[in-house]
Image (cartoon, grey):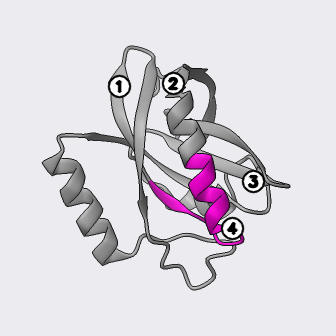
Amino acid sequence: MCDIRYGFLNEATRFALVRDCLARAPYEACGVMLGDFAPGRVVASGYALVRNAAGSPERAFRFDPDDWAKTYGQTQKNQRNIVGLFHSHPQGAPSPSLADRLGWDGWGSYWIVALQGGQASLHVYVRDQAGRLRPVELVVVP
Ligand SMILES: [Zn+2]
C-alpha cells in the first residue's frame, strides 16, 4: 500500500457519502469503501455504512459486530472489494485523531469525511512503511 499516491472517487459516490455522514451528525458515521486498487492508486466506486457502536459516537467509532458481519457478507455476495475504511469527523478535523492513528491496522486506505457547517471535505490516508498514516491526493472524477 506504500506506493499509493492517489485516491479516486466518483462524484456520485462522494455526494452520497457526504449526505449519509451529514445525516448522522453529530455522531460519527463509519463503514467501508468499496472499489479496486490500481498501480499507484485506490479507486473507490462505492461504500457501505456500518452502524457505529462506540460508547461516545460523537467522537469515536466502532463497528457494530452484527451489522459489520452483515455488511461484510453483502460485499462478498456482490463480489465487491473492500479497499478501506471511512468515518466522519462531525467536529470538522480533517486529519486522523490519535485513536485513529493507533486503532487502524490495515485495510488499504483510510478515508475521513470532515464535516463543517453543512459542508464536507474528504481526506484519504495510507500507511507508510514506518506505519504512519500518510495523506494521499484525492481525485474526484465524474
Ligand atoms: Zn477519527
Residue 48, compared with residue 123, is above or below; it is below
Question: On the image, numbered disc 2 is attached to which residue?
Answer: 8
Q: CA distance from mark 3 to mark 2?
A: 20 Å
Question: On the image, numbered disc 3 is attached to which residue?
Answer: 115
Residue type at the position of mark 1:
Phe
**Is there a contact, CB below 8 Å, between mark 1 and mark 4?**
no
Indicate which label's residue lies in the foreground, 4 or 2: 4
Task: Using a 10 Å C-alpha cutoff, classify the residue at mark 3 as few (fewer than 14 neighbours), some (14 to 19) or many (20 or more).
Answer: many
Q: Is mark 2 within 8 Å of ligand 1?
A: no
Q: Is mark 4 within 8 Å of ligand 1?
A: no
Question: On the image, numbered disc 4 is attached to which residue?
Answer: 25
| Mark 3 vs 4, N-terminal side | 4
Examine the rendering and report whether any part of residue 98 can be seen.
yes
Q: Is residue 141 magenta?
A: no
Q: Secondary structure at mark 3?
A: strand
In-front residue for pair 133/14: 14
Q: CA distance from mark 1 to mark 4?
A: 30 Å
In-front residue for pair 9/118: 118
| Stretch in magenta | 17-31
Task: Using a 10 Å C-alpha cutoff, classify the residue at mark 4 as few (fewer than 14 neighbours), some (14 to 19) or many (20 or more).
Answer: some
Q: CA distance from mark 3 to mark 4?
A: 8 Å
Q: CA distance from mark 1 to mark 3?
A: 27 Å
Q: Which mark is residue 37?
A: 1
| Mark 1 vs 4, N-terminal side | 4
